[in-house]
Amino acid sequence: MEQQIYKGKLIQFHPLKIAKKEQLTKNTFSLEFEIPGSLRENFKFQAGQFVSIKFIAHGKEVIHDYSMTSAPYEKKISLGIKVNSFNGATSELFRNYNAGDELMVGEPSGRFTLVSKPSEFRTIVAFAAGIGITPILSHFKNILHTEPRTRLFLFFGNKSSEELIYREQLDNLARISSERLQIFYFFSQEKTADQFFYGRLDEKKLNLIINQILHLDDTDEESTIWDAVDEVLICGKGEMIKSLANACYHHGIPKKNIHFELFEEYNDDIYPVEKEFPLIENVEVEFKMLGKEYETHLPDNREKILQQLLSQKFPVPYSCKSGICGSCECYLEEGEVELLENEYLTEKEEAQGKILACMSIIKSKKIKLNFDLS
């Protein structure tokens, strides 16, 4: 039986049987699901996407999102999952569900994706920390399978070698595709033989990586590997993403080619807001959500729309507050806003009148929004 639920957007759930469950490290595990023939179309996905899992934890129904490690050509759904605390919901998922059990799984979603370009020579660099490797693994498997001319570099940070997940899979990929894939492991709480690989992945470490690893390009003696980078993928916690995204941008990578996926709520802007806006006071706001009409007044436009509505206790959908997840996507039906840089909306969607409430500054005395997209 198909179920639907609203979590910012309408998610369609289907019962899937767990085909395989494996503990990877002390606090991570994987789940693999069987996809029956009748649901193959529903579970087609792109590399880098995630699914939502609905399950019972501590007597309550919860929904959590988990990125896929499988690539589309593998025709299966495989997830890498981290248990953050013994009493958390995910620990209940690990303890209470095993191979053969059914879970309600949402259809694939997310925009941490790349346009496939199998005929081009490309260089793609990825930075991951901890469980952030999951969508990167999906991307790299897919690219190695579908883009014979693309070369890949992965910089993967963990606290220690004991917590490093998917090392066997990653090392096998690097061995099989040694001419196209290079992987470098970094540890923040474990001393390494080479001091270069000790510490967190951040702006300082990126400077060293550019100068010591991505410097000589065998395919072009007049430029460096970094000069040839076409796309950057970053997945991890907010501070890491902010540091690396800004560093990549300052080192010449256009923002549109820097893609990131967040693994926690993050309330800060990834890129600094460089514009100033005229002050508008006593703003009238109307919005529709789940078929209900709401009205309120905001004191001014100093803060973005989502943050102000949340401060007034309205149940507006959100996850990241940083323009990454798209949970607060809505239509601007009346009024004017300034949509700041975000990782989610396309130019076409912006032209259709869509905005992200978490990245929008009000520029008129009244605005009208519609969060019911479907």
Image (tube, grey):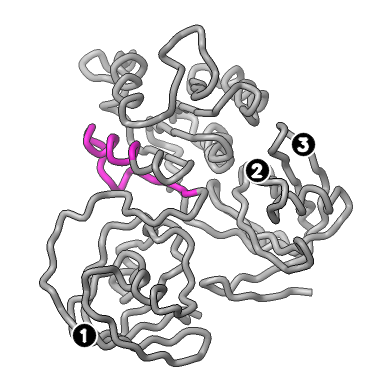
Q: Which residue is drawn at 48% across and 55% down?
A: 265
Query: Which one is earlier in the sequence, the residue at label 2 or at label 3?
Result: 3
- Assess whether mark 2 and mark 1 are in contact (beta carbons under 8 angstroms): no
Residue 183 visible, this orientation: no
Task: Give coordinates of residue 242: x percent, y percent.
Answer: 34, 43
The answer to if 245 sits in the magenta stretch is yes
In the image, is 172 to the left or to the right of 56? left
- Foreground mark, 1 or 3, reads 1
The answer to if 62 sits in the magenta stretch is no
Residue under pointer 2: 82
Q: What separation in Å lies between label 1 and label 2 (alpha carbons)?
A: 44 Å
Residue 71 visible, this orientation: yes
Residue under pointer 1: 282
Looking at the rendering, the stretch of residues picked out in magenta corresponds to 243-262
Q: Counting other residues with Cα less than 10 Å from the Cα at mark 3, is it few (<14), some (14-19), or many (20 or more)?
A: few
Q: What separation in Å lies between label 2 and label 3 (alpha carbons)?
A: 10 Å
- Foreground mark, 1 or 2, reads 1
Of the pair 277 and 342, the residue shown nearer to us = 277
* Count of number-bearing discs: 3
The local secondary structure at tag 1 comes to strand
The residue type indicated by label 1 comes to: Asn
Q: Which residue is drawn at 43% across and 48% down?
A: 115
The local secondary structure at tag 2 comes to strand
Of the pair 282 and 354, the residue shown nearer to us = 282
Residue under pointer 3: 23
Of the pair 246 and 179, the residue shown nearer to us = 246
Query: Which one is earlier in the sequence, the residue at label 1 or at label 2?
Result: 2
Task: Give coordinates of residue 118: x percent, y percent.
Answer: 46, 38
Figure quadrant of the N terminus: bottom right
The residue type indicated by label 3 comes to: Gln
Query: Which one is earlier in the sequence, the residue at label 1 or at label 3?
Result: 3
Task: Give coordinates of residue 216: x percent, y percent.
Answer: 30, 13
